[in-house]
């Protein structure tokens, strides 16, 4: 079987016309659709892709569950990235976000920004029928997670659930002032919020905080390899 | 007090759930111009606001499929209001409008929400703040800024280098880094046998827009 070099990942939800613009303008050997399992267009899309010698993969997700979408999209992109590099001439990984509900679209956009993958919006202008291929301002090989330092990751790895500040400091092994500085940064980045309950301060992870907490073991593994 | 921003298309109901947020101070909707169905939706939302005594502002989006333009309009409008607190409802309008709103909200750290089409249940998307500028070198930013100030965001490589007073080798290193990140492209200059033209990614302007 020929090696896959160019992969197009797209959100999907009953928008064949927009997807067709992406398929036409973004060259690919493999099409990966992230969507609901019950979409009736999927057999046709699969058939079309296979007829033109390409591969088709569907990744199921509940498109209205933002957290599930974010994790699925990110894992999908990270899993596909190495495939484009294994070919004799490095291929490309591109994302199209023009189809599906906006929860899924938002999650895919954020996941792509984290994975450092190019994002496109392909559409058909209603009034003129003109096909549009817009590259969104995402930066290739720039990964949002790289903005966090060592101290930040020490805290992020424990953001799976709400924790009382002193308990968190003990767990991380930081003095409170050092923890405060890290929490201030993470608060600014939207990963945590601090709330006072019963005279104690609790650190609560946001959805994004939990998303990064899920990445923490992988980050540690990579830094150990380095 | 909270300002609700919303992109609006044909369905007025997409905006209304956001008005149930506690302490709503005003509603600002971004809606396409010259579309009768959109105008009808705007009228219905406006009537609802009048009834609820919520100040209503409508911002006309003349080019609803132009990401850069929509993002600039949204950003300028949000800058004008200098809100204590803001929430952006991205349910209505074209996907380009929603994507533009998302990008502006990512840059500004403004939370976004989405009213599910079938149930109109509001799903609050998490706060996501990005700052790509902090990842660029000073020289890299200089090159991008220079290109964004040029017509069509492009210029001959030699012109960019000379204008920024950079040595050939330094310029080459920074240009390579920007190319690797997909922020600029370099092509042969059709007007010169040996020259090159550098072009900034058109939507790069959005990433630099907070400056």
Image: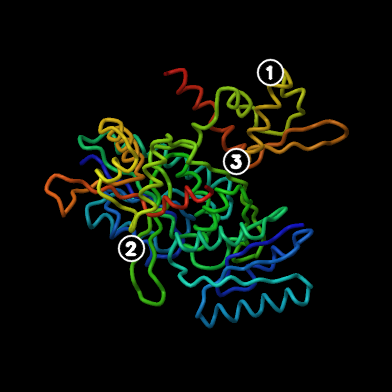
Residue B136 falls in which quadrant of the image?
top left
| Labels 2 and 3 touching (C-beta < 8 A) | no
- Of labels 1 and 3, the one closer to you: 1
Q: Which mark is residue A98?
A: none
Alpha carbons under labels 2 and 1: distance apart: 52 Å
Task: For mark 2, name the chain.
Answer: A
- Image quadrant for the N terminus of chain A? top left
Task: For mark 1, name the chain.
Answer: A
Q: Which residue is mark 1?
A: A174
- Image quadrant for the C terminus of chain A? top left
Alpha carbons under labels 2 and 3: distance apart: 31 Å
Q: Position of residue B128 (x, y in %)?
A: 58, 45
Nearest the viewer among B95 and B180 is B180
Q: Which residue is mark 2?
A: A21
| Labels 1 and 3 touching (C-beta < 8 A) | no
Q: At 33% from the left edge and 58% from the top edge, which residue is drawn?
A: B152
Q: At 63% from the left edge and 26% from the top edge, which residue is drawn?
A: A155
Is residue B55 found left or right of B119 in the rendered image?
right
Q: At 26% from the left edge and 51% from the top edge, which residue is drawn?
A: A54
Nearest the viewer among A5 and B61 is B61
State whether residue B86 is above or below residue A146.
below
Q: Which residue is mark 3?
A: A208
Task: Please say whether residue B129 is visible from this viewpoint.
Answer: yes
Task: For mark 3, name the chain.
Answer: A
Q: At 79% from the left edge and 59% from the top edge, which residue is drawn?
A: B23
């Amino acid at each position: 079987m020929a090696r896959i070099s160019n992969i197009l990942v797209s959100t999907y939800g009953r928008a064949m016309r927009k997807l067709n613009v992406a398929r036409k303008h973004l060259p690919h050997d493999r099409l990966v659709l992230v969507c609901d399992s019950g979409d009736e267009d999927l057999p046709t899309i699969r058939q079309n892709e296979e007829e033109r010698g390409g591969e088709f993969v569907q990744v199921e997700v509940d498109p209205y569950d933002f957290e599930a979408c974010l994790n699925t999209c990110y894992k999908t992109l990270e899993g596909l990235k190495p495939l484009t590099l294994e070919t004799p001439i490095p291929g490309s990984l591109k994302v199209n976000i023009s189809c599906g509900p906006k929860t899924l679209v938002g999650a895919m956009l954020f996941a792509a920004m984290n994975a450092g993958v190019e994002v496109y919006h392909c559409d058909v202008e209603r009034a003129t029928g003109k096909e549009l291929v817009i590259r969104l301002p995402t930066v290739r090989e720039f990964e949002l997670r790289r903005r966090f330092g060592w101290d930040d990751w020490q805290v992020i790895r424990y953001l799976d659930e709400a924790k009382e500040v002193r308990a968190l400091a003990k767990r991380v092994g930081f003095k409170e002032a050092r923890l405060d500085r890290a929490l201030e940064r993470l608060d600014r980045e939207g990963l945590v919020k601090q709330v006072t309950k019963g005279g104690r301060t609790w650190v609560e992870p946001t959805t994004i905080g939990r998303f990064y907490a899920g990445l923490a073991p992988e980050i540690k593994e990579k830094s150990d390899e380095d | 007090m909270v300002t609700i921003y919303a992109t609006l298309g044909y369905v007025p109901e997409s905006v209304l759930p956001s008005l149930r947020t506690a302490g709503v101070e005003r509603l600002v909707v971004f809606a396409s111009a010259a579309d009768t169905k959109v105008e009808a939706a705007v009228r219905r939302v406006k009537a609802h606001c009048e009834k609820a005594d919520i100040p209503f502002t409508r911002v006309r989006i003349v080019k609803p499929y132009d990401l850069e333009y929509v993002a600039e309009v949204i950003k300028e409008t949000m800058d004008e209001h200098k809100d204590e607190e803001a929430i952006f409802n991205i349910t209505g309008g074209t996907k380009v409008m929603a994507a533009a709103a998302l990008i502006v909200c990512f840059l500004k750290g403004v939370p976004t929400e989405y009213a599910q089409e079938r149930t109109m249940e509001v799903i609050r998307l998490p706060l996501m703040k990005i700052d790509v500028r902090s990842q660029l070198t000073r020289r890299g930013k200089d090159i991008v800024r220079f290109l964004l100030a040029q017509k069509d965001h492009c210029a001959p490589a030699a012109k960019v280098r000379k204008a920024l007073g950079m040595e050939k080798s330094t310029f080459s290193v920074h240009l390579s880094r920007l190319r690797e990140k997909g922020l600029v492209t370099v092509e042969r200059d059709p007007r010169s046998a040996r020259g090159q033209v550098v072009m900034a990614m058109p939507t790069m302007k959005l990433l630099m827009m907070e400056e």
